[in-house]
Image: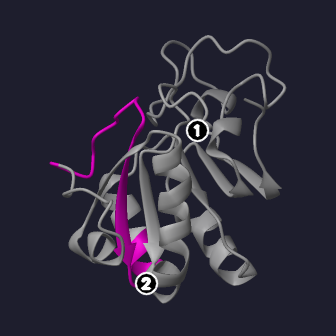
Amino acid sequence: MRRPGICGATETLLIDAAIAAHLLPAVVDDLTGAGCDLRGDARASAIDRRIGPPPANWDTEYLDAILAIRVVDGIDQALDHIAAHGSGHTEAIVTGDPAVAERFLQTVDAAIVIHNASSQFADGGEFGMGAEIGIATGRLHARGPVGLEQLTTYKYVVRGSGQVRDL
C-alpha cells in the first residue's frame, strides 16, 4: 500500500466472478499483510472470511487503509457499478483482454482512466504538468469569456503494462 490518503488511492476493488475464487485470496493475503481493512459484499466474504461486512455505501472515499471489495459478473456489471458509484476522478482496470480494456477506457466517465497501471499515477506531476494546484471532476466550462478552448474538457487515458509508483 502506498499513500492511501491521496485522491488517486483505490477505494473499491471490483473483481470478476470468473477469477475471484482463484485470485482474491492472494490479493487478501497481500492487503491484510500490509494492514489494510477489507470490507466486501457477501460473494467476496464467502470466498475469503478475512473480508469484513460490506461498506455502509459504495460511495465512500476512505482516504485510509480501507478497501471495499465487490464481486461482479463481468464488465457490464463493473461499468454499471462505476457509473453509479465512481468518483469521476480516476478509475483503473487490470485486464489482459484488449477489447475489455478498450471498452472500459472509452465508456467510463472519469477525468483519468487507466489500464494495467497504478491509479496513483493520477496527478499533474506524473502527466508532466508540473506541481498540481488542484483537481477537478466537474464538467463546467470556465467563467468569463468563453472560446473553443474553454468549452473543452479532458479525459486522460493511461495505458500500462503493470507499472506502479515507488513507495
- Looking at the rendered structure, the secondary structure element under dot 1 is loop
Determine which residue is flagged by label 1.
1
Magenta-drawn segment: 56-78
Residue 29 coordinates in the image, percent (x, y) = 51, 58
Neighbour tally class for label 2: few under 14, some 14-19, many 20 plus, Cα within 10 Å: some
Given residues 150 and 159, the one toward you in this image is 159
For image coordinates 40% across by 29% down, the residue present is 63
Q: Callout 1, which amino acid?
A: Met
Q: Position of residue 121 (x, y in %)?
A: 71, 37
Write the residue at 55% across / 67% down: 26
Q: Mark 2 and mark 1: span between their CA atoms? A: 24 Å
Position of residue 125 measured from the top left corner of the image (x, y, whole percent): 77, 22
- Badge nearest the viewer, 2 or 1: 1
Looking at the picture, the colour scheme in use is: one colour
Among numbered discs 2 and 1, the one appearing first in the sequence: 1
Q: Is residue 35 above or below residue 110?
A: above
Residue identified by numbered label 2: 17
Kindly identify the residue that appears in the image at 47 percent across and 34 percent down: 137
Q: Residue at x 54, y 23 (%)?
A: 135
| Quadrant of the rendering where the C terminus is positioned | top right
> Where's residue 149, x and y in %?
68, 30
Label placed on residue 32: none
Q: Label 2 amino acid?
A: Ala
